[in-house]
Image: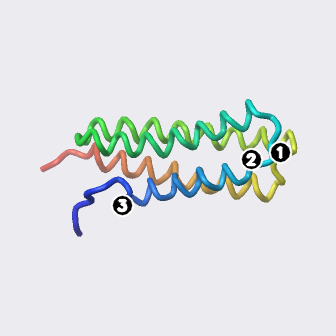
Amino acid sequence: MSKVERFEELRVWQEARALANALYDATEELRDFAFRDQLRRAAISAMNNIAEGFERRTDADFAHFLDMAKGSSGEIRGMTYLGEDRRYFPTEAATCLRAAAESLSGGLATFATYLRRPRV
């Protein structure tokens, strides 16, 4: 297995990028600007925390930033429920966005656990 040299190579970053783009697309016509902007900020935060943590170059820092990205993923999931309740998203779209955010969250948790494992 080769060493990852750039954050763009990380599967979790690629997933976060895809989720951010999906959220931008899903909110393109949304007139509730506060809701739209908060949801987009959470998606940007997830993606950028992965990148920033990677660039810190220590496992402890990286794991911390992955935790913050995971928090943003949870925020996205929570907001999609409100978006569905307010009829901003059809149920199917909200479910798909939540599934993507949940998948990202799981990957982030696994990766952070790996970074925190004791080294022999």
Crowding near the residue tagged with mark 1, few <14, some 14–19, many ≥20 C-alpha atoms within 10 Å: many
Query: What number is the disc on residue 9?
Result: 3
Q: In front: mark 1 or mark 2?
A: 2
Q: Residue 7, percent across and down?
A: 35, 53
Q: Are marks 1 and 2 in contact (CB under 8 Å)?
A: yes
| Horizontal side of residue 62 vs 86, given as left or right | left
Inspect the image, locate mark 3, and give the three-letter code of the amino acid beneath it.
Answer: Glu
Q: Residue 102, percent across and down?
A: 58, 51
Crowding near the residue tagged with mark 3, few <14, some 14–19, many ≥20 C-alpha atoms within 10 Å: few
Residue projecting furthest to the top? 34
Inspect the image, locate mark 1, and give the three-letter code of the amino acid beneath it.
Answer: Tyr
Q: Name the residue at 61% across, 56% down.
A: 100
| Horizontal side of residue 45 vs 40, given as left or right | left
Label 3 SS: helix
Which quarter shows the N terminus?
Answer: bottom left
Query: What number is the disc on residue 75?
Result: none
Looking at the image, tell me whether mark 1 or mark 2 is earlier in sequence order: 2
Distance between the alpha carbons at the discs numbered 1 and 3 = 33 Å
Q: Residue 89, percent across and down?
A: 81, 49
Query: What number is the disc on residue 88?
Result: 1
Distance between the alpha carbons at the discs numbered 3 and 2 = 27 Å
Looking at the image, tell me whether mark 3 or mark 2 is earlier in sequence order: 3
Kindly identify which residue carries mark 2. 27
Quarter of the view holding residue 8: bottom left
Inspect the image, locate mark 2, and give the three-letter code of the amino acid beneath it.
Answer: Thr
Q: Name the residue at 74% across, 34% down.
A: 35
Looking at this view, is 92 or 36 the one in front?
A: 36
Q: Residue 34, percent across and down?
A: 73, 30
Q: Are marks 1 and 3 in contact (CB under 8 Å)?
A: no
Looking at this view, is 110 or 76 the one in front?
A: 76
